[in-house]
Amino acid sequence: QVQLVESGGGSMQAGGSLRLSCTASGYTFNGGCMAWFRQSPGKQREAVAGISNAGGRTYYAAAVKGRVTISQDDAKNTVYLQMNSLKPDDAALYYCGVRLTTCAMFENNWDRYLSYDTWGRGTQVTVES
């Protein structure tokens, strides 16, 4: 059974940085793909960044591009989300998801949250202005 556990959230001043982690168990980085999404109260879950585990190709939402980096550590079965220059709009519950079955056309559909098979419980990010 695949499980994802997010960590690293917290409260930060605007302009600061955080690094979120998503550690997978029951899954190895072999042809799958993963992504970070976020959701704040009253809003839909939105894509932040995605990564194809095999090739390491990365994708970013326009709202975070240039401020966020997604990466992976195969040895630790962990995907990271480095967030810099935090803004109040970045405040949300951050989830990671994994797509186990296919990553076909990932560059075109990485931001569709219904396409992911398993999610973690999330880690909260608060940004103080």
Image (cartoon, grey):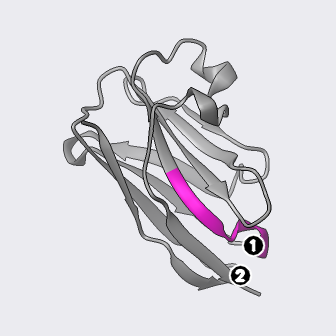
Residue 8 shown left or right of residue 1 in the figure: right
- For disc 1, the neighbor class at 10 Å (few under 14, some 14 to 19, many from 20) is some
Helix, strand or loop for disc 1: loop
Q: Are marks 2 and 1 in contact (CB under 8 Å)?
A: yes
80, above or below 124, in the image: above
User: In the picture, which quadrant includes the C terminus?
Assistant: bottom right
Q: Which secondary structure, mark 2?
A: loop
The residue labelled by disc 1 is: 87
On screen, 29 above or below 5?
Answer: above
Magenta region, residue range:
87-95
Residue at position x 22%, y 48% in the image: 76
Which three-letter amino acid code belongs to the residue tagged 2?
Answer: Ala
Where in the figure is residue 36, as x and y percent of width and height? 55, 47
Residue 60 horizontal side relative to residue 104, left or right = right
Q: Which mark is residue 14?
A: 2
| Vertical order, 5 against 1 (above or below) | below
Quadrant, the N terminus: top left
What numbered label is drawn on residue 120? none
Which residue is depicted at the point 44% across and 35% down? 98
Residue 49 is drawn in which quadrant? top right
Residue most toward the top?
104
Magenta includes 124?
no
Across and down, in percent, residue 99 comes to: 45, 28
- Residue 72, given in percent of the width and then of the height, sits at 37, 44
Name the foreground residue: 35 vs 85.
35
Q: Label 1 sits on what residue type?
A: Lys
Residue located at (54% from left, 71% from top)? 124
Location of residue 52 in the rendering, given as x and y in whole percent from the top left corner: 46, 28
